[in-house]
Image (cartoon, rainbow, N blue to C red):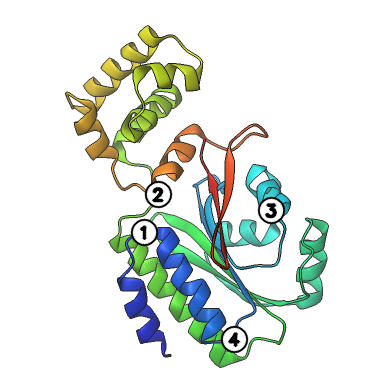
């Protein structure tokens, strides 16, 4: 299957998980790539949502989302330079990976950034037991570029909206949860504040946003990325107590920062 055919498959998907799943399956089944991991990141670098078919434990996935990402030199390099790391030294990659708890096969790495106008949106990490040839690397870069373009068409972004920029950190939390459909009581419980405080925050948010209802607020915040990722981004980096879920979809694993 050619890159354009994979791009056609991508075009038929409606969200990040489905799109990332197409890339994982296509690169394994059609290109023979050993393993793939695709993640979305907040502007801080915090991973928000990941889809992978890699040979790692759920404990490793959870640890990475809970803070191990801060010590990831490859993520740091791509956040700084926004360029791919397409011919990583296997020995160095495995040394760093195993220091961070990776227990899978020794692989060569080809890491490609998912980009949007505001900067780094995510990372596609491909691992192969055999070295990546030039043609395969070019195909993986082209596929990742198609994925970036498709995510832009879906309006999946981690860029801060003008509305969020006008809100305080606490107001962002309240706005994100309200947009998710949480009631005032639920927001109060989640954020450990009184219901009256929630109401006051919502009143201030409506005034700053120029809206009159939750529905209008939700529309303003809609499609800023995967729904749960919006909440996570609004709440900042994950603490050790943050909720991170791991679920299976066939051979794929989906890791999600919920709150």
Query: Label 4 vs label 1: CA separation?
Result: 25 Å
Is the N terminus in the top left, top right, bottom left or bottom right quadrant? bottom left
Res. 137 image quadrant: bottom right
Mark 1 vs mark 2: which is more N-terminal? 1
Q: Which residue is mark 3?
A: 58
Classed neighbour count for the residue bearing mark 3: other residues with Cα under 10 Å, few (<14), some (14–19), many (≥20):
some
| In-front residue for pair 102/235 | 102
- Mark 3 element type: helix
Mark 4 or 3, nearer chain start: 4
Give the residue at x 17% y 23%: 212
Mark 4: secondary structure: loop
Q: Residue at x 58, y 64 (%)?
A: 52
Mark 4 vs 3: CB contact within 8 A: no
The picture places residue 168, in percent across and down from the top left corner, at 41, 24
Q: Which residue is mark 2?
A: 226
Q: Residue at x 70, y 67 (%)?
A: 55
Q: Where does label 1 land, which residue?
A: 15
């Amino acid at each position: 299957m050619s890159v354009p055919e994979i791009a056609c498959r991508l075009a038929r998907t409606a969200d990040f998980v489905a799109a990332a799943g197409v890339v994982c399956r296509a690169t394994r089944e059609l290109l023979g790539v050993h393993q793939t991991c695709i993640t979305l990141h907040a502007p801080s670098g915090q991973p928000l949502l990941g889809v992978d078919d890699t040979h790692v434990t759920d404990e490793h996935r959870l640890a990475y989302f809970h803070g191990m990402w801060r010590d990831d030199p490859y993520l740091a390099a791509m956040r700084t330079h926004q360029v791919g790391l397409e011919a990583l030294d296997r020995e160095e990659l495995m040394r760093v990976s195993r220091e961070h708890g990776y227990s899978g096969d020794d692989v060569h790495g080809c890491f490609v950034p998912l980009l949007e106008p505001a900067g780094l949106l995510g990372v596609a990490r491909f691992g192969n037991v055999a070295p990546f040839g030039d043609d395969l690397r070019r195909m993986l870069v082209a596929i990742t570029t198609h994925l970036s373009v498709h995510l832009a068409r879906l309006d999946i972004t981690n860029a801060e909206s003008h509305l969020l920029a006008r809100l305080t950190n606490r107001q962002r939390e309240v706005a994100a949860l309200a947009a998710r459909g949480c009631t005032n009581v639920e927001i109060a419980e989640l954020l450990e504040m009184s219901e009256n405080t929630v109401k006051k925050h919502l009143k201030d948010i409506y005034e700053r946003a120029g809206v009159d209802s939750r529905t209008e607020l939700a529309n303003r915040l809609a499609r800023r990325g995967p729904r749960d990722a919006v909440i996570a981004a609004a709440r900042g980096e994950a603490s050790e107590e943050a909720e991170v879920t791991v679920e299976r979809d066939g051979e794929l694993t989906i890791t999600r920062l919920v709150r």
